[in-house]
């Protein structure tokens, strides 16, 4: 069992690196109905007002094809048909009333990176979509301008691969790679641009601070203010003009975990430290519905240690 992390003076670190920060009002956390089965390294996305959670590692290290959907209105979970291909470390997004599960690893540990794209449509079940141009797990994905962007990941070494999917043509197009190749990163869209935050490289540096922004209009990458607490396996979500980096692993603390929550304001370009998570986790995905961020499952120690815990985070106004 992990220990609750001690808050660090992250606002001071951010101020030294990025300029003055302003204190934010305290965020609100709530504990919700737990996942039906503890698991980590999952994919998750919002679809039709629900939180969909797919794949991941079980407590014994097996990769599961399990899929579940959470209804915030009733605080209940419902089981879905299992994934055709069981994966851990996939990315997941929703677009056009469908859930897209991208890549992942099919073997134990980080073995067997796949290019599989699995598509779920409520009432119709699963089908296979056009595969990724390159196989990879530990990637991130986001939707911008009605298209899906798959960012980074690993297939042995870490990669900076970037590709975009056009659902109307059922086709992937390879784009300019991310400047910092990495996996276990987080991605969120602010103002139509993709923000790629944190991650790790080649399984060695677990505490990357890289924050790079891709503009689909120009096809170019640029650098933004670095993540104050470098980490990987964290969750990233956008609400309004702000993105939030939550949890992660690679900490020097005994459990290897980060409970830090940091907010980036796209208007000011400044990071602000918020109060930490009630329970430090990694290997979960952040799902935004309305003004709340849902964080189902994850691991509570570095490496394997899945939990069924499920929390919602209501950030302060941004």
Image: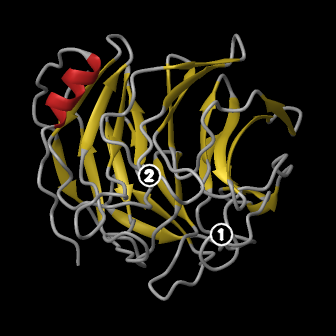
Figure coloring: secondary structure
Mark 1 element type: loop
Q: Position of residue 93 (x, y in %)?
A: 60, 45
Q: Is residue 242 left or right of residue 198?
A: left
In the rendered image, the quadrant that contains the C terminus is top left
> Is residue 89 shown to the viewer in this render?
yes
Q: Looking at the picture, does residue 73 appear above or below residue 179?
A: below
- Answer above or below: position of 190 versus 163: above
Sequence order check: which comes first, mark 1 or mark 2? 1
Q: Measuring 60% from the left and 68% from the top, which residue is drawn there? A: 88
For this view, does 264 lie left or right of residue 272?
Answer: right
The residue shown at (51%, 50%) is 200
Any part of residue 99 in sight = no
Depicted 3 relative to depicted 8: above or below: below
Residue marked by disc 1: 87
The CA span between labels 1 and 2 is 19 Å
**Residue at figure coordinates x 35%, y 50% from the top left:** 294
Q: Which residue is mark 2?
A: 232
Mark 1 surroundings within 10 Å by alpha-carbon count, few (fewer than 14), some (14 through 19), many (20 or more): many
Q: Position of residue 242 (x, y in %)?
A: 35, 25
Of residues 150 and 182, which is closer to you in this image? 182
Residue closer to the observer: 294 or 218? 218
Q: Nearer the viewer, mark 1 or mark 2?
A: 2
Residue 266 sits in quarter: top left
Q: Secondary structure at mark 2?
A: loop
Q: Are marks 1 and 2 in contact (CB under 8 Å)?
A: no
All told, the count of numbered labels is 2
Q: Give left or right: position of 87 versus 52.
A: right
Q: Quadrant of the N terminus?
A: bottom left
Q: Which of 45/78 is in front?
A: 45
């Amino acid at each position: 069992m992990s220990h609750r992390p001690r808050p660090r003076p992250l606002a001071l670190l951010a101020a030294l690196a990025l300029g003055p920060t302003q204190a934010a009002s305290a965020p609100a956390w709530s504990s919700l109905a737990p996942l039906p089965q503890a698991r980590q390294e999952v994919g998750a996305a919002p679809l039709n007002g629900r939180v969909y959670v797919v794949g991941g590692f079980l407590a014994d290290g097996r990769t599961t094809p399990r899929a579940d959907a959470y209804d915030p209105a009733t605080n209940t979970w419902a089981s879905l048909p299992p994934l055709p291909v069981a994966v851990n470390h996939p990315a997941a997004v929703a677009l056009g009333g469908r859930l897209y599960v991208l890549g992942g690893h099919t073997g134990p540990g980080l073995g067997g990176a796949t290019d599989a794209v699995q598509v779920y449509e409520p009432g119709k079940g699963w089908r296979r979509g056009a595969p990724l141009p390159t196989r990879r797990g530990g990637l991130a994905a986001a939707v911008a301008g009605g298209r899906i962007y798959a960012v980074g990941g690993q297939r042995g070494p870490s990669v900076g691969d970037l590709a975009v999917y056009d659902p109307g043509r059922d086709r992937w197009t390879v784009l300019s790679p991310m400047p910092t190749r990495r996996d276990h990163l987080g991605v969120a869209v602010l103002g139509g641009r993709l923000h790629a935050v944190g991650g790790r490289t080649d399984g060695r540096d677990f505490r990357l601070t890289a924050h790079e922004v891709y503009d689909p209009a120009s096809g170019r990458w640029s650098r933004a203010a670095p993540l104050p607490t470098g980490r990987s396996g964290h969750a990233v979500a956008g609400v309004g003009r702000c993105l939030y980096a939550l949890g992660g692993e690679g900490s020097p603390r005994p459990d290897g975990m980060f409970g830090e929550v940091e907010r980036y304001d796209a208007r000011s370009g400044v990071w602000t430290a918020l109060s930490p998570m009630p329970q430090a986790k990694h290997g979960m995905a952040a799902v935004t519905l309305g003004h709340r961020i849902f964080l189902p499952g994850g691991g509570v120690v570095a490496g394997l240690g899945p939990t069924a815990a499920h929390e919602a985070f209501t950030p302060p106004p941004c």
